[in-house]
Image (cartoon, rainbow, N blue to C red):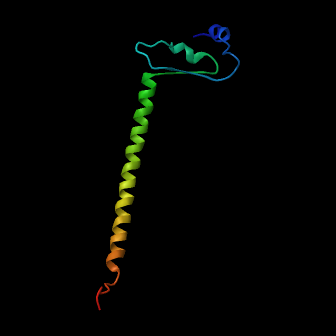
Amino acid sequence: VDEALLKENGLAGGRPLMLVDISVPRNVGEDCKQIPNVSAYNVDDLKAVVARNTAMRQKEMIEAETLLREEAAGFSGWRESLPAIPTIN
């Protein structure tokens, strides 16, 4: 992909263009990133995004589990502190 090809296909109007190459071997050259307003991503780029998101989710999951344990302990303590009322008088 080069600037001439973009003009030929009516894509060179200054609008951003995102190219996502999920093929192996790659069909979009690395030099596409040098063209103004063109963002090119490949499978390796997507794998890096997935790895970052997975790490963030793991961190959030640990924080959520800690919060859940604290709230469950607080609720259990509150429930046990309620006075017992006989059901049958």
Q: Residue furthest front?
A: 88
At horizontal 33% and vertical 67% (from top left) the residue drawn is 73
Give left or right: position of 16 versus 63.
right
Expressed as whole percent of the image width and height from the top left, the position of residue 8 reads 66, 8
**Quadrant where the image shows the N terminus:** top right
At horizontal 36% and vertical 57% (from top left) the residue drawn is 66
Give left or right: position of 39 versus 83.
right
Question: In the displayed structure, would residue 52 be above or below residue 11?
Answer: below
Q: Residue furthest right?
A: 13
Expressed as whole percent of the image width and height from the top left, the position of residue 3 reads 64, 11
Give left or right: position of 89 versus 18.
left
At horizontal 45% and vertical 25% (from top left) the residue drawn is 45
Give left or right: position of 83 versus 23.
left
Question: In the displayed structure, would residue 55 be above or below residue 63?
Answer: above
**Quadrant where the image shows the C terminus:** bottom left
Question: In the displayed structure, would residue 52 be above or below residue 13?
Answer: below
Q: Tell how many labels.
A: 0
Q: Nearer the viewer, residue 79 or 39?
A: 79
Expressed as whole percent of the image width and height from the top left, the position of residue 41 reads 50, 22
Residue 26, image quadrant? top left
Expressed as whole percent of the image width and height from the top left, the position of residue 29 reads 51, 12
At horizontal 68% and vertical 13% (from top left) the residue drawn is 10
